Image (cartoon, helix red, strand yellow):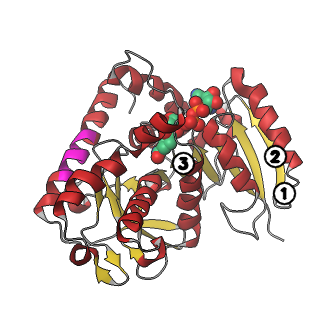
Amino acid sequence: TQAPVNVTVTGAAGQIGYALLFRIASGQLLGPDTPVKLRLLEIPQAVKAAEGTAMELEDGAFPLLSGIDIFDDPKQAFEGANVALLVGARPRAKGMERGDLLEANGGIFKPQGEAINAGAASDIKVLVVGNPANTNALIAQAHAPDVPADRFTAMTRLDHNRALAQLSKKLGVPVTELKKVAIWGNHSATQYPSIAHAEVSGKPATEVLTDQQWLADDFIPTVAKRGAAIIEARGLSSAASAASAAIDHVYTWVNGTPEGDWTSAAVVSDGSYGVPEGLISSFPVTAANGEYKIVQGLEIDDFSRARIDASVNELAEERDAVKKLGLI
Ligand code: NAX
């Protein structure tokens, strides 16, 4: 049997952590043949709650779970990590300005980036879930100069899955009939969920979905504001769906995308599609051999161009703001 893979999860006592850890322990993150060792990071006040979650994980008697360690020190938590899921973040409090939010999160993601740089395994893969996810990932990446930049990613897979779900409902076809949907830009309300290159049962989605009004006034805002709609309905933010998307993101990263399809992830831009190099922005991506690659050569129509630019401009502003704060 294989040696266990070290998976570090931050914010382990939170609501996403609660849903995520059981899926990891059951083997859904890395596959049914890969044992995992969990390394949980929490702030000191939440360590006891993380211990409670760890007790329940133990009670799951998961065959693939070969150990759980709990830390309140990032240096220890990321030691030997092969996969890191950065879920814990500072939420926006009432009256908090964007600068305050970015600064508070800089205080979390800078030391975590440093800890990853210092102690993670050479094959480390990092997924940032905690918001503002793209810019938190940028901060962590900036403080891990010895780790290849492309190992830092942020999650837009939940947005991607939400887009698939909305299209599936609208068209009355199963999600398995849908291919090449894409999320571009920031994981925020400015994101651009696109069907410009999508296929429905092998046909161009733009031929099947001719209701341009529905796309602009319904589909895009429904996907982009789904997080707020969940809070409104549930009284709590998305948790199990976010955990599920995090599982999907890492599973795809490790196991690849199917032939003829892609997925969405926020990855370090190489300048493709006019997205400034270095920004961590969502693109259509394929995965193979443990690497995410931006899909190249897509034609970008005017409608898409304007929306991609708007979201990427927001990312550039966030980057400039954290630069000004000395966080990168
Ligand atoms: P919770 O508030 O339930 O849990 C967050 C946990 O993180 C808490 O237990 C807290 O103690 C811990 N934490 C805070 N600072 C930490 C630090 N420095 N080190 C380790 N742990 C720390 O939030 P939850 O609902 O689990 O959401 C977590 C994050 O995911 C939030 O930032 C949220 O905005 C973000 N989301 C991102 C999504 C995405 O698609 N990228 C979707 C879902 C979610 O909104």
Work out whether 188 lies above or below 6.
above
Q: Which residue is mark 3?
A: 242
Q: Is residue 276 visible?
A: no
Q: CA distance from mark 2 to mark 1?
A: 8 Å
Marked residue nearer the N-terminal end (1 or 3): 1
Q: Is residue 16 left or right of residue 179?
A: right
Q: For numbered disc 2, what is the local secondary structure?
A: helix
Q: Which residues are magenta?
A: 307-314
Q: Are marks 3 and 2 in contact (CB under 8 Å)?
A: no
- Front residue (pair 167, 27): 167
In the image, taking residue 168 as reference, residue 74 lies left or right, namely right
| Amino acid type at mark 3 | Ala
**Residue occupying the far top of the picture:** 95
Dot 2 alpha-carbon crowd within 10 angstroms: few under 14, some 14 to 19, many 20 or more: some
x, y (%) of residue 326? 36, 25
Label 1 sits on a secondary structure element that is: loop
Q: Amino acid at mark 2?
A: Leu
When the figure is inspected, residue 210 is found, relative to residue 267, above or below; the finding is below
Q: Residue beneath label 1, please?
A: 62
Q: Earlier in the sequence, mark 3 or mark 2?
A: 2
Asked if one can make out residue 87 in the rendered structure from this viewpoint, the answer is yes
When asked about the image quadrant of residue 71, the answer is: top right
Disc 3 CB within 8 Å of nearest ligand 1 atom: yes
Single out the residue that lies furthest toward the left: 302
Between 193 and 247, the residue placed more toward the observer is 193
Q: Main secondary structure of the magenta part?
A: helix
What residue is shown at x 27% (from left), y 53% (from top)? 218
Which residue is located at x 84 percent, y 57 percent? Answer: 62
Which of the two discs, 2 and 1, labels the residue nearer the N terminus? 2
Seen at 21% across and 78% down, the residue is: 207
Magenta segment includes 150: no
